[in-house]
Amino acid sequence: MARHYPSLDSPASNRTMPNAHPPLTPEMLLSGYAQGIFPMAMSRDEPGLHWFDPVRRGIIPLDGLHVSRSLRRRVRRWDYLVRVNTAFSEVVAACAARPETWINAGLTALYQELHAAGYAHSLEVWREDALIGGIFGISLGGAFFGESMFSRQRDGSKLAMVWVVDRLRSAGFALFDTQYLTPHLQSLGGVEIARAEYRARLAEALRRQADFTAPPPPTPQSVLQRITQTS
């Protein structure tokens, strides 16, 4: 998700692979995810990409999302709309619109190709005609690789997280990978697991069939009911 990558010579910082060369194709990107690695740029202006293989991997347990009382009230208020794949480009651009970002032009182009091919998805939170929050990621089998999220109004990204997790559970996904664990993700129930455990979970998830676009639109009441039953 919103990645704050550590120093590359820090022991907790992961194993980094050589720069992605020749230039990545969508097929190569999906192959990397299936092997447990992922690419990112070190800055917006860097043309190259690096493969990362964290020692500790961040995930959101699909049965362990933490929803505070205030967030439950926001979900239930229902003064927003939730849409899927109606503004993918805008979500990616919003996630990259930070002073520092790992999303460069090369990755943006790859995400667009994967979106066109049905592998990359966005979930958007709208208030009237304004996009106030969202998440985008890549689905492969029963694994969802959350790339990044953003918020333009209070709780915009948290609302997106609630609805993404419910969608993943309803669609039969087994793994919600966030690459790294940030304080924001930890507050929502995110945890870190060892590389070996992550690889085992990934292998199991890839054997599943799941469709991010399949679940019909739920209601806030049904979402909160399912969360209450599992969290």
Image (spheres, rainbow, N blue to C red):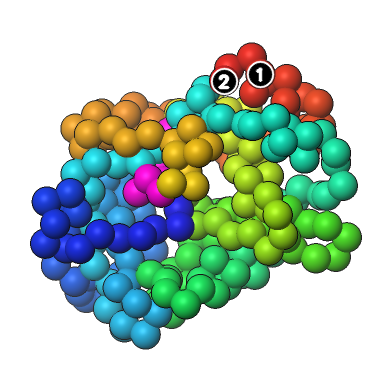
Please state, as top left, top right, bottom left or bottom right, where the C terminus lies in the image. Answer: top right
Residue nearest the viewer, comparing 220 with 152? 152
Q: Which residues are magenta?
A: 175-182
Q: Is residue 116 visible?
A: no
Residue 148 at what x, y percent from top left? 49, 57
Q: Quadrant of residue 77?
A: top right
Q: Is residue 178 magenta?
A: yes
> Which amino acid, by three-letter code, is at mark 1?
Thr
Look at the numbered disc 2 and give the secondary structure of its residue. Answer: loop
Would residue 151 be found to the left or right of residue 153 on screen?
A: left
| In the image, residue 123 above or below residue 60 | below
In the rendered image, the vertical position of residue 226 relative to residue 1, given as above or below = above
SS at badge 1 = helix
Relative depth, front residue between 83 and 133:
133
State which quadrant residue 88 falls in. bottom right
Residue shown at 70% from the left, 37% from the top = 71
Where in the figure is residue 10, as x and y percent of width and height? 14, 57
Q: Residue at x 62, y 51 (%)?
A: 157
Q: Residues within 10 Å of mark 2 (few under 14, many from 20)?
A: few
Mark 1 and mark 2 in contact? Answer it, CB < 8 Å: yes
Question: Height in image: 123 above or below 203?
Answer: below
- Name the residue type under label 2: Ser
Q: Which residue is mark 1?
A: 228
Q: Is residue 177 visible?
A: yes
Instruction: Give coordinates of residue 211: x percent, y percent.
Output: 57, 38
Residue at (24%, 41%) from the top-left corner?
56
Q: Which residue is mark 2?
A: 231
Q: Residue 75, percent across and down?
A: 76, 37
179 over 127 or under it: above or below: above
Instruction: Look at the magenta stretch and give its main secondary structure.
Output: strand
**Does residue 22 appear left or right of residue 231 in this picture?**
left
